Amino acid sequence: MASLADISRRANVSIATASRVLNGSSHPVSDATRTRVLAAADELGYRPSELARALVKRTSRIVGVIVGDIVDPYFAEIAHGVDHVAGAAGHLTMVCNTERRPEAELAHLGVLLDYHAAGVVFAGSGYENAAEAAALRSVVQDMQTRGSAVVALAARDLDCPSVLVDNRAAARDATEHLLGLGHRRIAFVEGPPGLHTSAHRLEGFEEAMAAAGAEPARLPGGFEYEAGDAAAGALLAAGELPDAILAVDRNRRREEAQAQSLRLAGLLSRRKLAQRLEVAPDARIGVLGSDAFEVVRVRNKRRDVLVLQLLCERF
């Protein structure tokens, strides 16, 4: 690979002059010299070092996407969208997996700061009472001071532009929809503890239930299929099923068997649904979830259960 020294020798100029031409410096260089340097670079197939350029200009073409779970299709869709736009503009997308740990977020931000990232997109929710909150705000402020663009796609304790969904209103509307259908005993499957998004959705659910004087029930949950499956097991073990279930799942997963399945449908998986319907074939239960997922039909010889999409988060 050709270096600046190779270019300077071929064009018969100093390394400093070759660098000024190739890096677009405002330092005066004659047209003839500029032409020789550019011709030499083309002949030798010269490619400038992006890392060196970032160190000199204190900016790079890196866009960091901070995700909570790199295997979650929800975050994959966001990363795909960012990469589509950033790539078209000549930028490189760097996906940073945090496993929903604030300390991992802080570590990734430190690296992006060192590499003078052009921008950072926070794809997931912030954390309530995180010990790293002040440090995160400080690093974000440093990045903004250095010219990096920072954007959040969920509730965060950061001073940056945000594109948000009103999760309280979404959960409240979903709960009111179920109440309007005549359901009174509604079970709410919570999101991961400690997230602003989880807390806001729970608040919306409880507001609607309290206003209606209905009987709420809460179950620990998460954004994983396994969390939904565990909630289903807890419901079945309790005996009497609620009238309806509201889950804050935001992922999707397909089965290639007879029925398609969501992580949300871990709440009504084929095995558990069949087990329950054998005991109470006339039982009916409403299921509602929030976020981007598809309409799914879980079929049984005695009953069809339709899981409908009501709310969809798209950025």
Image (tube, rainbow, N blue to C red):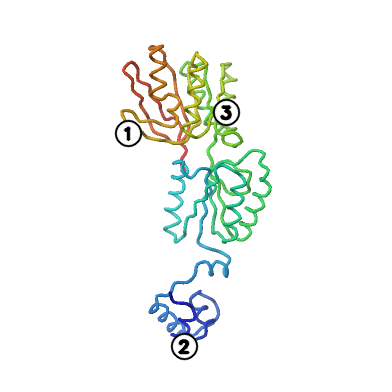
In the rendered image, residue 304, in percent from the top left (x then y), is placed at 35, 20
In the displayed structure, 131 sits above or below 141; it is above
Residue occupied by mark 3: 204
Mark 3 or mark 2, earlier in chain: 2
Camera-side residue of 97 and 305 = 97
Q: Residues within 10 Å of mark 3 (few under 14, many from 20)?
A: many
Q: Image quarter for residue 271?
A: top left
State the SS at label 3.
helix
Residue occupied by mark 1: 256
Q: Marks 1 and 2: which is nearer the front?
A: 1
Q: Residues within 10 Å of mark 1 (few under 14, many from 20)?
A: few
State the SS at label 1.
loop
Q: Residues within 10 Å of mark 2 (few under 14, many from 20)?
A: some
In the rendered image, residue 96, in percent from the top left (x then y), is placed at 52, 50
Inspect the image, locate mark 3, and give the three-letter code of the amino acid beneath it.
Gly
Inspect the image, locate mark 1, and give the three-letter code of the amino acid beneath it.
Glu
Residue sitting at 53 percent across and 48 percent down?
Answer: 66
Camera-side residue of 253 and 174 = 253
In the rendered image, residue 251, in percent from the top left (x then y), is placed at 45, 36
Inspect the image, locate mark 2, and give the three-letter code of the amino acid beneath it.
Asn
Circles 3 and 2 in contact, beta carbons < 8 Å: no
